[in-house]
Amino acid sequence: MKRRILVIGLGLIGGSLAKSVGESDENHIIGYDTNKETLEFALMNEIIHESCSTIADSALMADIIILGTPITETIKFMKELDQLTFDHDVIVTDVSSVKKPVNDVAKALTNKQIKFIGGHPMAGSHKKGIKAAKGHLFENAIYVLTPTAECTDPMINSLKAVLKETKSNFVVLQANDHDEMTGVISHFPHLIASALVHQAKKWQNTHSFIPKLAAGGFRDITRIASSNPELWQDIFYHNKGKMMHLIDDWIMEMHELKQMLEQNDKVSLSSYLHQAKDYRDDLGTTKKGVIPSFYDLYVDIRDQTGAIASVAQLLAKKEISIKNMQILEIREGITGVLRLSVPTIEDQQESYQLLHSNGYELMVEK
């Protein structure tokens, strides 16, 4: 008998989960979304096997319920599920990027049949909605699970078995630890990116040419400020305690930097920059843990038709897998930089030799 999985909220994340989990013949996917067009698209494109117009009946038949909604809506749906009378245990999970508020609500649920395991698949896209859903969105991504104390290892393993089609790397964390870590490396950088954009906008009143100069590094560092504002407002609201603490830390950090500049302390400033470079360069290079290691190359290419394809074809002929690709500091009519990430140091070395022998100027990140 197939597992019945109800996915509530068929946006980018919920839709991608439905698509990947639905690839297993063991799973029957039921979809719910407040947007009728979203449901019709999901059915027509076989992202879900059936749709439902109300949650109650489908939830009572489900073995697994995935809440693919923003945090505030997730909490609302959890309280609705708490009022249902289940005749069997049901695993409920979510995709929220802030875990403690959700887990706190889970602890307060009175329905003994609901076994809540918090979830956060750490992947996304600049696109949103069901049309952007991809079955491979979470491949090799970290998928954090934050189970409540009542959840046993067999329950956690059952959820992992359902989610195995995502090909994610699972990590079990305490909800508060998760929120602190994602606050540091995800949520707070988004705040800073938005603040940098606002600073540039204000300075545009003094220097109208700023938008034409704001490319390359500025675009890279502020890219995340283009993400869904409503979604991020919800994240900041529910993780506001951590955000305020990090803002205080940041103010102290900026004060120390300001002192170095005021005192013309070249030694301290140089040391500060070197420490930052060393830490940044070491990110993702460890072979320990669940985070996959990638090795980067930076290739100078001309801004012309087929330039990127030529590089990719050379590596493809040697069966070298490109795990990630990013264009850096492209200017019309001049040389740009193509950053390639490959899975092994051997691939990095072979790629360097191959591209160098074909006339490309490049450097390797060590």
Image: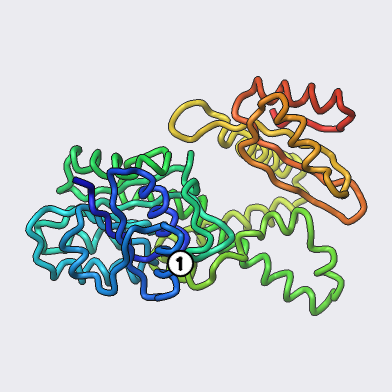
Q: Residue at x 36, y 75 (%)?
A: 34
313 shown above or below 211: above
Residue 275 pos. (x, y %)? 64, 37
| Mark 1 Cα shell of 10 Å, populated few (<14), some (14-19), many (≥20) | some
Q: Position of residue 173 (x, y in %)?
A: 33, 44
Q: Judge whether 251 appears above or below 166 on screen.
A: below
Q: Nearer the viewer, residue 107 or 165?
A: 165
| Residue drawn where x is 58% and y is 37% of the image | 283
Q: Residue furthest bottom?
A: 205
What count of labels does the image hold? 1
Residue shown at 84% from the left, 39% from the top: 300
In which image quadrant can residue 359 be found? top right
Towards the viewer: 268 or 138:
138
**Quarter occupied by the N terminus:** top left
Name the residue furthest right: 333
Residue 70 relative to residue 219: left or right: left
Q: Nearer the viewer, residue 248 or 349?
A: 349
Name the element at disc 1. helix
Task: Give the quarter of the figure containing the C terminus.
Answer: top right
225 relative to 313 in the view: left or right: left
Residue at numbered disc 1: 41
Q: Position of residue 121 (x, y in %)?
A: 42, 50
Amino acid type, callout 1: Phe
Q: Is residue 49 above or below residue 209?
A: above
Residue 273 screen position, x and y as percent: 70, 42
User: Which residue does the image show at 19% across and 70% down from the upper left?
Assistant: 56
